[in-house]
Structures are given as structure tokens and as C-alpha cells.
Image (cartoon, rainbow, N blue to C red):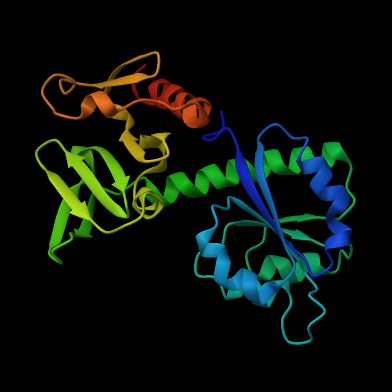
Amino acid sequence: MMLKQKYNILLLDDKLNTLVYLVKMMSEISFIGNIIVQSDWKECLHKIDELDIDILFLDMDFGDPEVDGNTWLSMLTDPPVTVACSSYSNYVYSAREVGIKYFIGKTPSFRALEELLNDVVLEVDRKAEKSKRDVKQLEIKDVSGEEVMIQVKDILYAIINNNILTIYLESGTVVTQMSLKSFASMLPLEGFAKPHNSYLLALDKIEVIRGKQIFLKNKSKSRKGDELLHITQEFAKEFRHKYEIFKQNNLS
């Protein structure tokens, strides 16, 4: 089972008109979420870290004698799982030299694209699990500038409000200036999920979910504010999906 219900794709190609067919087919695949198309490799180089991208479809020829897809990818410190996307098969070998495992043309059959994306999202999940599996503690700088060590197992949930993140622990809180996305990127992917745009919740701390209300283990009566933890419609499917996977893997 996939870790996410929807996976976001970025396509980078200097000739956007060649992507029309590919984008149309992608939009018909049930597990594909946002599809972002970019034509300016320089702008994309600066924006990609701000985007929530799972999969990159990368053109191999930008029409620039100094920069092609391979050299552009090498500029990224932590690139998404990448698919070389080109009408010319001679790029397959050079793409492999920079770690690209997948290759597809710009006018594949729907079945070929769907099969490729099934393989790619499994790679996305494996990469996420591998990079986060052994995270046991985090070093966070609080709003006073002091370094605080947080044990991942002690995290209950985190709430963002006006760019201030409050991390609720088994004992106490840590307040820091950090985005919720940045905090989530530091944590084991399979152990945390967003039931709400402003919350990130540790799945192992859930006692029960009743409707849209989330109750934490031994916390719903003893911690002020836990009654605010609820699931919004926007995040309901993804949150429940991740929680079901978590229960299957950890609570069975």
C-alpha cells in the first residue's frame, strides 16, 4: 500500500507544448495529485525547495549548450525521485550516470506511464522511509535562541500559528520559529500526519478517533487544548489513509 494517497509531480521542460499529452494522462491517474509545469530551469532551481514535490519529470535538453537535464539535477542537494523525460533514447545512459533510474518518452501509452509511476511512487516511499527510519532525536533552536534536544518518541503534536511552531511533548512544550513543513521533513514519514493545515500529529499517540475529533492516549482529559485536535475535510482522506497504514504496520 502506498504511503500517500496523492503524489505531486513537477515537470521541467523548456518546450511546454511537448508536455500536453503527458500532463493530460497524468491527471487521469488516481494517485497523482498536483502537477506543476515549469519551463525556466533557472527559476525552477530556486523554487523547487519551496514546492512539495514527490516526483520530478526532467527534460534532458534545455536548448542551452552549458546546462542540460543532467547538469541541472547535479545542482540539487536532495533531488526528488527523478524520471528522465525525452524523445531521444540516447539520454538514457547519461541519465543513469547522475543516478536517474527511470526514463520515459513524451508520448508513451497510458499503460506504460501508469506502470512507470507505480514503480516510481514505491521508490519515493522507500526513499522517505530510509532517510527517516533511524531519527531518534532532533536539535531545535527555540524562540530564545537556545538549542533544545527533543526525543521523537516524546512528541505528541505540533501546531503552527503566525509562523510560530509550538511542539507539544509528553512533558512540556518547545516554541520555535519554523514552518510546519520544515518540522515534518525532520521526522519519520510513517509516524506523523496532518489532520489539519495547522497541525502535525504523532500517530502512535492516538487513542481513538470519533468522527472528526482526535483523542490522545491519556491526554484528552489532562492536557488543555487537546480538544482542539480535529480532522478537516481537506486532510481527512490522506490522514485516515496514513493512520490505517500505521496501524497495520505497528498495532496489529
Q: Could you tell me which quadrant the C terminus lies in?
A: top left
Name the one closer to the observer, 132 or 8: 8
Q: Is residue 3 left or right of residue 211?
A: right
Q: Is residue 125 left or right of residue 21?
A: left
Residue drawn at point x = 88 percent, y = 59 percent: 18
- Vertical side of 105 occupied by 235: above or below: above
Q: Which quadrant of the figure has residue 205?
A: top left
Number of marks in picture:
0
In percent of width and height, residue 212 lies at: 39, 18
Q: Is residue 130 left or right of residue 90?
A: left
Residue drawn at point x = 35 percent, y = 52 percent: 186
In percent of width and height, residue 100 lies at: 67, 61
- Vertical side of 198 occupied by 98: above or below: below
Q: Which quadrant of the figure has residue 225?
A: top left
In the image as oriented, which residue stretches furthest toward the front?
162
In percent of width and height, residue 151 lies at: 18, 46
Name the one closer to the observer, 60 or 170: 170
- Vertical side of 23 occupied by 76: above or below: below
Q: Could you tell me which quadrant the N terminus lies in?
A: top right
Residue 113 visible (yes or no): no
- Vertical side of 41 occupied by 228: above or below: above
Residue drawn at point x = 23 percent, y = 54 percent: 138
Residue 69 visible (yes or no): yes
In percent of width and height, residue 91 lies at: 81, 68
Q: Which quadrant of the figure has residue 247?
A: top left
In the image as oriented, which residue stretches furthest toward the bottom?
66
Residue drawn at point x = 88 percent, y = 47 percent: 108
